[in-house]
């Protein structure tokens, strides 16, 4: 139920995101989800890709600072209140979300929420116990 995510640190300058996506595309790496956060000096690009280890090595070989983290991908109903329901479960479990981002596969069906928790094992236990469907890495990488 844990999904590997890569995090790339990059300078906050024009063209860096295009460079990363082009490098991955040339090597056949498909991006499944992404999030970009920035400060005045640098950005953190978080990616879930179809081949984490290969993508990590390719980016390192091209001079990028890359790390991996584990996240959880929860399936929620793509309707008003879908996210609120999962967040109420997280609140009741007194879990701390470090960050999150989301995407939908098909409007009106399900949304996928990517969570990074300070205690991923407690989060998995709480969410599964509440009946929240968590996707495996293989399911996410194959989207």
Image (cartoon, rainbow, N blue to C red):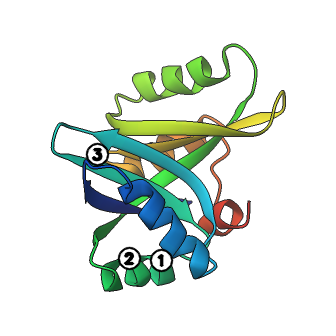
Q: Secondary structure at mark 3?
A: loop
> Residue drawn 15% across and 44% down?
41
Q: Position of residue 37 (x, y in %)?
A: 33, 40
Q: Tag 2's secondary structure? A: helix
Mark nearer the viewer, 1 or 3: 1
State which quadrant residue 117 falls in. top left
- Which residue is disc 2 drawn over? 59
Using the numbered discs, state the Cα–Cα distance from disc 3 to disc 2 in whole angstroms: 26 Å
Horizontally, is 81 left or right of 102 in the view?
right
**Of the two numbered discs 3 and 2 in the rendering, the one whose residue sits closer to the viewer:** 2
Residue 120: x and y, percent? 38, 51
Q: Is residue 82 above or below residue 2?
A: above
Measuring from the top left, give residue 114's x and y in whole percent: 52, 44
Categorize mark 3 by other alpha carbons within 10 Å: few (<14), some (14-19), many (20+): few
State the separation of the CA atoms marked 1 and 3.
25 Å
CB under 8 Å between discs 1 and 3: no
Between 64 and 35, the residue placed more toward the observer is 64
- Identify the residue shown where x is 59% and y is 79%: 26
Check contact, mark 2 vs mark 1: CB within 8 A: yes
Place residue 81 in its image quadrant. Answer: top right
Residue at figure coordinates x 72%, y 67% from the top left: 142
**Where 15 falls versus 91 (above or below)?**
below
Q: Which residue is mark 3?
A: 118
């Amino acid at each position: 139920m844990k999904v590997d995510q890569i995090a790339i640190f990059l300078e906050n300058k024009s063209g860096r995101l295009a460079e990363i996506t082009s490098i991955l595309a040339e090597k056949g790496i498909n991006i499944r989800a992404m999030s970009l956060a920035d400060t005045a000096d640098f950005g953190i690009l978080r990616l879930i890709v179809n081949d984490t280890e290969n993508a990590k090595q390719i980016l390192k070989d091209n001079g990028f600072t890359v790390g991996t983290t584990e996240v959880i991908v929860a399936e929620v109903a793509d309707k008003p209140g879908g996210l609120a329901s999962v967040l109420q479960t997280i609140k009741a479990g007194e879990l701390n979300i470090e960050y999150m981002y989301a995407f939908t596969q098909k409007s009106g069906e399900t949304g996928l929420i990517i969570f990074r928790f300070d205690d991923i094992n407690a989060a998995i236990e709480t969410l599964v116990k509440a009946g929240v469907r968590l996707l495996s890495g293989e399911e996410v990488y194959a989207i």
